[in-house]
Image: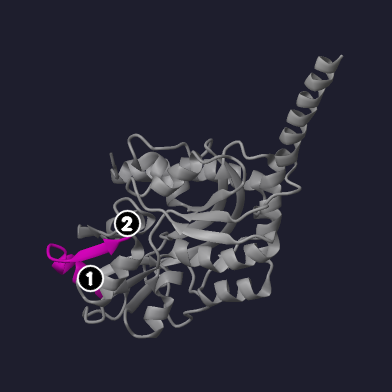
Amino acid sequence: MGRQRRLLAVTLSASLQFVGPASGQDWPTRPVTMVIAFPAGGDTDIFGRIFAPRLSEILGQPVIVENVVGEGVMGGAYRVSKAVPDGYEFMIGHIGTHAQYQTIYKNPLYNAATDFAPVALLVEQPQVLVTRNDLPVNDLSEFVAYAKANQATMQFGSGGSNSPTYLNCLLFNTAIGVNVTHVPYRGSGPALQDLIAGRIDYMCAGLASVKRQIEGNQLEAVAILANNRSPVLPNLPSAHEQGLTDFETTIWFALFLPKGTPAPIVQKLNDATVTAMNTASVQERLKELGVTVVAPERRSPEYLQKFVVSEIEKWAPIIRKANVKAD
């Protein structure tokens, strides 16, 4: 009888231990880590540091931002894909980490569609063609003419080989018919520093990461690489209205937990994220950066799962046609 009681107690204890974390009611009980798979100063880092303080307030625990760079541009995402699925480590991913890299890399370190628990799509932003201040161009037509005449000696920078800033600029170069040397950096922040210093000629950068430098006359903005102008830079014409029609480079950002994270925890983080997205101070800061918060119907985990799959499928033929590859 005593043995049966002990077995019943052990079974009940194990059941309670399983139900507790899976319910998500007590999560989080300690600090949570938000992984940024890129160095400080780039778009992903900027957005992470906008959302983290508000998420900390909502969740009642510190959300610690950690920049994890390694294994090319896949290291941070790989770490999260292999993390314990208990809700204490998640990441901001984007069009590169969760769409483009799946085709670019011959042997991706993870499967973006199956190795994560999608949480919420956050924001979208256009890219901007920016140049060093002393490049002798005033608009897109002058840039195209100059690039065609000087492509053998020009250099463009990016946040790393096969990063979205690289891929989108490569597609831009193809669209205007030039072949310019690429200079990869460990993140868009270091690349922008060299562009400001005049060591490289141009970049296709996220609007959030260059708005301040444009307004401070540290960089020259040539065009919003989209169909429409941005309300935060209303005097900067779009590529479309400057003659480069049917060309648009928009980067999206989203939150992901490791695969196997209990659904209640995923939902609790989604709820907190949506609350943060609806916070006036967060929206104002994102608006200042020219970033669009996605519509409410696009914020669910289910939507993000389908969206990631569709983005992988969308970019695969584009990348193969451009012959972009990485080991």
- The kind of residue on which mark 2 rests is Tyr
Asked which secondary structure carries label 2, the reply is helix
| Nearer to us in this view, 297 or 209 | 209
Q: Position of residue 7 (x, y in %)?
A: 78, 19
Q: Quadrant of the C terminus?
A: top left
Q: Which mark is residue 256?
A: none
Left or right, 231 with reference to 148: right
Q: Is residue 226 visible?
A: no
Which residues, given as a range, are shown in magenta? Answer: 142-159
Magenta stretch encompasses residue 146: yes
Task: Please report whichever mark, 1 or 2, sits nearer to the chain's N-terminal start.
Answer: 2
Residue 198, position as x, y percentages in the image: 21, 76
Relative horizontal placement of residue 273, taking residue 180 as reference (left or right) = right
Tell me what residue is drawn at x 38 percent, y 80 percent: 214
Q: Residues within 10 Å of mark 1 (few under 14, many from 20)?
A: many
Q: Which residue is mark 2?
A: 166
Spot the residue most to the right.
1
Rendered residue at 44%/64% (across/down): 43
Please tell me which residue lies in front, 326 or 92: 92
Q: Amino acid at mark 1?
A: Asp
Whole-angstrom CA distance, mark 1 to mark 2, is: 14 Å
**Is 32 on the left-hand or right-hand side of 100?**
right
Q: Which residue position holds label 1?
A: 201
In terms of image quadrants, where is residue 306? top right
Q: Tell me which corner region of the image, top left, top right, bottom left or bottom right, holds residue 262.
A: top right
Under circle 1, the secondary element is: loop
